[in-house]
């Protein structure tokens, strides 16, 4: 395992004790995702899915969401998933815990049938004596020590038997096969994130409702208060709605980055992250694929927002729609990476509120998304209202360094999005225009 971990994982099928299926996807979508991680093509994957589900008696329910299945049927789907890539060793960690007696007996009989008919080696961890057949080989763990191997029917008499089997490793043929494996795994990860985004209607709606409220409600109310002069990259006077549209795109990506971190925490708690850990792929590739999938989801949200804003007479030049795509990818990867870093510190979903209050909202309001930085500087200049007393003396430079917002990367990100939307690749610093 240490020297050839990826070929070994390719020949290993795992059924965890904790359920690891994605509850928001259907049975077929879960199995296709697993097949993509193992480099199986779509046509071959569909044939194997049909074969395994028919063996488990679950083919008629292949389009149902996993959330609608009972515990026994979910476990059958997990066994079908573990057998999808034709493993040589099937590892099961107490797979029948919490199941009723008929479901437990059906799974035990089926796994023993696989070992007898197809020659699959099975390593079954269990604490239930009735799941052991007389011909099974036993390894008893007692007080963190491993007892000698023995047959179940000879365990009482103390007769030991040793058995060792060397599993053949699967060697992928050539760089072309490896490239296809990486490509299929990447498509599977991206497809899973897009499916979850579309099927989670609450997440889909909240991703658009928040910026649309700012555009339709707040922009109309602040238009007269925050009237803007000519500022780069614009060459004429603009409305407040036009100014904040690129900023709201950055807000969409900012909240999507945090949503991706929340999704990783959810997958870690629900066990879905373990499916990635047993995939025969390097960890850096899986992490980069998750990051790119989150970035593409945020780009889809941004273009949907621009399509709705078009009917609100916010119509950037057509070249701007193409020019903003590289900026969306770069900014989305930056904010998505920030979300992944946050997910390493967030242990529970309940801690996400603190991230919103102490990370997301300060980055949002201390940027140029809603107003130029020189506006923020003017608003914070309170020297005339500051009481000049002995205990609280008036500061000599009240407005130096406006909240240090310009030192954060968020204003530069918003400025680049604004430049791309207006089809201006080169734009100077956003400074206060001269009177």
Image (spheres, rainbow, N blue to C red):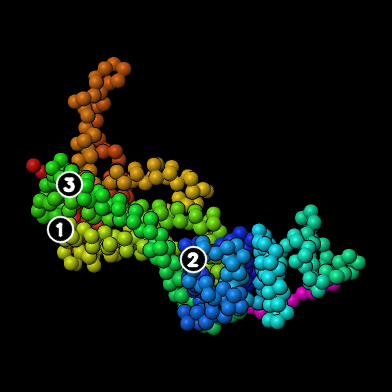
Residue 313's disc is 1
Kindly identify the residue that appears in the image at 51 percent across and 63 percent down: 68
Span shown in magenta: 161-169
Image-quadrant location for residue 73: bottom right
User: Quadrant where the N terminus lies?
Assistant: bottom right
User: Quadrant where the C terminus lies?
Assistant: top left
Q: Are marks 2 and 1 in contact (CB under 8 Å)?
A: no
Q: CA distance from mark 2 to mark 1?
A: 41 Å
Left or right: residue 114 compared with residue 130: left
Binning the other alpha carbons within 10 Å of mark 2 as few (below 14), some (14 to 19) or many (20 upward) gives some
Which residue is disc 2 drawn over?
65
Q: Nearer the viewer, residue 250 or 288?
A: 250
* Labels 2 and 1: the sequence-earlier one: 2
Q: Name above or below for residue 165 compared with residue 21.
A: below
Binning the other alpha carbons within 10 Å of mark 1 as few (below 14), some (14 to 19) or many (20 upward) gives few
Magenta residues: mostly which secondary structure?
loop
Kindly identify the residue that appears in the image at 30 percent across and 53 percent down: 209
Q: Are marks 2 and 3 in contact (CB under 8 Å)?
A: no
Q: Name above or below for residue 209 compared with residue 290.
A: above
Q: CA distance from mark 1 to mark 3?
A: 13 Å
Q: CA distance from mark 2 to mark 3?
A: 42 Å
Label 1 element class? loop
Q: Is residue 259 magenta?
A: no
Mark yes or no: residue 413 visible.
no
Residue, far right:
157
Image-quadrant location for residue 146: bottom right
* Labels 1 and 3: the sequence-earlier one: 3
Left or right: residue 189 compared with residue 74: left
Q: Name above or below for residue 285 compared with residue 221.
A: below
Percent of width and height locating residue 423: 18, 62
Which residue is disc 3 drawn over?
220
């Amino acid at each position: 395992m240490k020297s050839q971990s990826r070929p070994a994982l390719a020949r290993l099928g795992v059924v965890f004790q904790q359920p690891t299926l994605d509850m928001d996807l259907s049975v077929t979508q879960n199995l296709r995702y697993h097949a993509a991680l193992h480099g199986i093509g779509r046509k071959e994957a569909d044939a194997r899915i049909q074969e395994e589900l028919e063996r488990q008696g679950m083919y008629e329910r292949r389009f149902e969401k996993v959330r609608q299945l009972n515990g026994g049927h979910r476990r059958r789907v997990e066994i079908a998933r573990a057998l999808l890539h034709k493993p040589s060793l099937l590892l099961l960690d107490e797979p029948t815990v919490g199941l009723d007696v008929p479901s437990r007996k059906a799974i035990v009989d089926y796994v023993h049938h696989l070992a007898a008919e197809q020659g699959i080696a099975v390593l079954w961890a269990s604490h239930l004596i009735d799941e052991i057949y007389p011909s099974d080989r036993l390894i008893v763990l007692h007080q963190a020590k491993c007892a000698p191997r023995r047959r179940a029917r000879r365990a009482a008499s103390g007769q030991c038997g040793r058995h060792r089997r060397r599993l053949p490793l699967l060697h992928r043929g050539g760089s072309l096969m490896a490239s296809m494996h990486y490509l299929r795994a990447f498509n599977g990860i991206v497809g899973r994130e897009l499916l979850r985004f579309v099927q989670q209607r609450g997440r889909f709606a909240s991703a658009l409702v928040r910026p649309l409220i700012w555009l339709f409600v707040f922009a109309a109310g602040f238009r007269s208060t925050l009237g803007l002069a000519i500022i780069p990259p614009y060459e004429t006077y603009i409305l407040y709605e036009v100014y904040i549209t690129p900023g709201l795109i950055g807000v969409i990506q900012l909240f999507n980055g945090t949503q991706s971190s929340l999704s990783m925490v959810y997958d870690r708690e629900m066990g879905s992250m373990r499916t990635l850990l047993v995939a025969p792929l390097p960890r850096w590739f899986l992490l980069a694929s998750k990051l790119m999938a989150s970035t593409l989801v945020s780009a889809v949200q941004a273009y949907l927002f621009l399509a709705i804003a078009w009917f609100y007479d916010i119509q950037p030049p057509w070249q701007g729609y193409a020019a903003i795509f590289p900026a969306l990818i770069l900014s989305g990867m930056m904010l998505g990476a920030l979300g992944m870093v946050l997910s390493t510190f967030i242990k529970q979903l309940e801690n996400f509120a603190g991230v919103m209050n102490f990370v997301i909202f300060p980055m949002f309001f201390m940027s140029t998304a809603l107003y130029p930085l020189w506006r923020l500087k003017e608003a914070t200049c309170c020297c005339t209202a500051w009481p000049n007393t002995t205990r609280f003396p008036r500061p000599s430079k009240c407005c130096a360094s406006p909240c240090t917002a310009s030192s954060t990367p968020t204003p530069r990100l918003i400025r680049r999005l604004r430049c791309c939307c207006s089809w201006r690749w080169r734009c100077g610093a956003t400074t206060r225009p001269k009177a």
